[in-house]
Amino acid sequence: MERKDREEGACLERGALYVVGTPIGNLGDFSPRARETLAAADFIAAEDTRVTLRLLTHFGIKKPLLSYFEHNKLEHGPLIVARLQAGETCALVSDAGMPAISDPGETLVAACAQAGIPVYVVPGPTAALSALVLSGLPTGRFTFEGFLSVNKRGRKEHLEAVRGETRTMIFYEAPHKLRKTLSDFSKVFGPDRKIALCRELTKLHEEVWRTTVGEAAAHYREQEPRGEFVLVVAGGEAPAAPQQGYTLEEAAALARELAAAGLSSSEAARQAAQETGYRKSQLYTALLESQSP
């Protein structure tokens, strides 16, 4: 069941997938076990073979590389599974951090699990958790939201789904989309919501800016965003318990009455929520449903 690479001293199981975390910036964070695993694997599946080749060259590792990324995962995934079933050992890496986190490696791990192929993890740096630790925001409960969709409808639905989230939220964002994201955050969470913008983590110009959504949006309207960002957003306040005497149906009816009196749907839901203790989002949704033909 196992193969021994005598030169590197690593022992890997034949026909297994090894998910290997790589540095998110500082090469000193690359663990000895991760280096040994890459050196002992039969081949390496990499998000960008050019990026991985530079990493391997730095550590004096020579191994066959196979590209595996979002736009070829449906083609190359079955090839990797077939090679694993034939007894080869594969190390899966992304450009930086842990594979399968906002990464097509998720699909490959699922395919291996379905095929009964052993999967092992070699832990490494993770931008999301590193940013959470540095944010100064509550870490006891949090939710990882990854990248927002570039599709307008999908983006809106994602943000609406977390509008009432009370846990700390972690988002990834590219510099060219940061301004739009901060603008959307301001509309959904409000300009006073606390946020930590973590940029270039573990690199020479690492920066963590703890501020508010409104201040961040104003700053980056004037300054060009640079580097990859992790955005850690404070959760909202937990909703007050509904006032005794109001059912959800009665609270929704109150919202409808306010809307019929001339208030906008949003304002009607807000006032009804304040009066009854239910979430504004709950009443707003109920109000829209009642207005649908």
Image: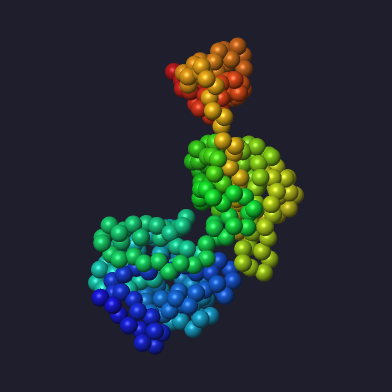
In the picture, residue 77 is in which quadrant?
bottom left
| Residue 177 seen anywhere in this rendered image of the structure | no
- The answer to whether residue 272 is above or below residue 236 is above
How many marks the image carries: the answer is: 0
State the residue lying farthest toward the bottom.
7
| Residue 236 seen anywhere in this rendered image of the structure | yes
Q: Work out which quarter of the rendered image holds the N terminus and state it.
A: bottom left
Foreground: 275 or 271?
Answer: 275
Q: Is residue 95 left or right of residue 115?
A: right
Q: Is residue 223 left or right of residue 52?
A: right
**Residue shown at 43% from the left, 59% from the top:** 100
Give the image location of residue 281, x and y in percent: 53, 29
Q: How is the image coloured?
A: rainbow
In the picture, residue 243 is in which quadrant?
top right
Give the image location of residue 272, x and y in percent: 58, 20
**Residue shown at 58% from the left, 55% from the top:** 132
Q: Work out which quarter of the rendered image holds the C terminus and state it.
A: top left
**Residue shown at 68% from the left, 39% from the top:** 191
- The answer to whether residue 112 is above or below residue 15 is above
State the residue lying farthest toward the front.
244
- The answer to whether residue 44 is above or below residue 132 is below
**Residue shown at 50% from the left, 74% from the top:** 31
Give the image location of residue 21, x and y in percent: 47, 67
